[in-house]
Image (cartoon, rainbow, N blue to C red):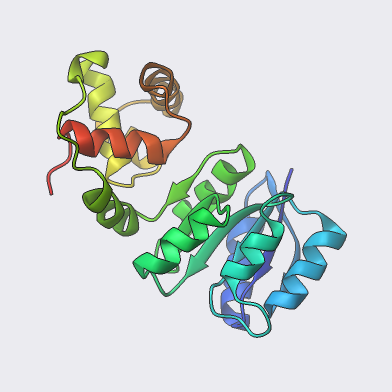
């Protein structure tokens, strides 16, 4: 069971996130709080596996809370504000994910599971902008490292699709998608979906 702490100054957001997450058989919400100080206190007392943090909160903002908790709790920043400086600071402070609040329930759940497993997941629109900025190498990676089907899966990962969405788009089973992703991570020597997406951009698999 993945234990989750929710921190957001809007009660409706906290209630909505709790409803989405508690519908999952493998996730439980141990607390929801309205400010950064309470988030730090609750996290240190309850030791949740994952904390969902808003950026703009009273007391301490989500970026400062991330810095304080990232050593002991996996952090997913969920915010209305997807400014580049926030994204970079959140990741530098140890966040395992960065989602905008319009990312949708499926991506929220997958981000929590990814964080709990030590992986990272970032909203598609944030990923695209970030990778466009950072992925301009002098030489493209070798596409021959991957099979044609693995390239198809990688392309969809780079677009920000969840495993279930990739399965539907490519007419594959969910287990097959997971197998392809695991194989890709091994072949490319990357740790998570962000690494896969970065490789896809550098290899020219994704159109700008």
- In the visual, does 163 lie left or right of 9? left
The front one of 17 and 50 is 50
Residue 31 location (% of width, % of height): 76, 66
Residue at 24% x, 53% y is 133
**Relative to residue 90, is residue 177 depicted above or below?**
above
Occupied quadrant, residue 181: top left
Residue 191 visible somewhere in the drawing: yes
Residue at 62% x, 69% y is 64
Which image quarter holds the N terminus?
A: top right
Residue 104 visible somewhere in the drawing: no
- In the visual, does 208 lie left or right of 197? left
The front one of 131 and 7 is 131
Residue at 31% x, 39% y is 198
Residue 177 location (% of width, % of height): 39, 26
**Relative to residue 70, is residue 199 depicted above or below?**
above
Residue 100 location (% of width, % of height): 42, 66
How many numbered marks are there?
0
Residue 180 location (% of width, % of height): 38, 21
- In the visual, does 194 lie left or right of 37? left
Residue at 32% x, 39% y is 197
**Relative to residue 143, is residue 12 depicted above or below?**
below
User: Farthest residue toward the front?
Assistant: 138
């Amino acid at each position: 069971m993945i234990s989750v702490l929710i921190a957001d100054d809007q009660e409706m957001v906290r209630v909505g996130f709790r409803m989405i997450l508690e519908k999952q058989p493998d996730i439980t919400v141990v607390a929801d709080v309205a400010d950064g100080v309470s988030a730090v206190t609750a996290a240190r007392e309850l030791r949740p596996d994952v904390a969902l943090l808003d950026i703009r909160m009273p007391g301490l903002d989500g970026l400062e809370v991330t810095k304080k908790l990232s050593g002991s709790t996996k952090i997913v920043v969920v915010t209305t504000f997807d400014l580049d400086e926030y994204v970079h600071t959140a990741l530098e402070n140890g966040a395992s994910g960065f989602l905008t609040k319009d990312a949708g329930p499926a991506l929220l759940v997958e981000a929590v599971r990814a964080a709990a497993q030590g992986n990272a997941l970032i909203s598609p629109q944030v990923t695209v902008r970030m990778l466009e900025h950072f992925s301009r190498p002098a030489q493209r990676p070798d596409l021959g490292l991957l099979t044609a089907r693995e390239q198809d899966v990688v392309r969809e990962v780079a677009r920000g699709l969840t495993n279930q969405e990739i399965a539907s788009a490519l007419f594959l089973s969910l287990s097959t998608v997971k197998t392809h992703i695991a194989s890709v991570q091994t072949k490319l020597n990357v740790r998570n979906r962000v690494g896969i997406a970065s490789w896809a951009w550098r290899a020219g698999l994704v159109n700008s």
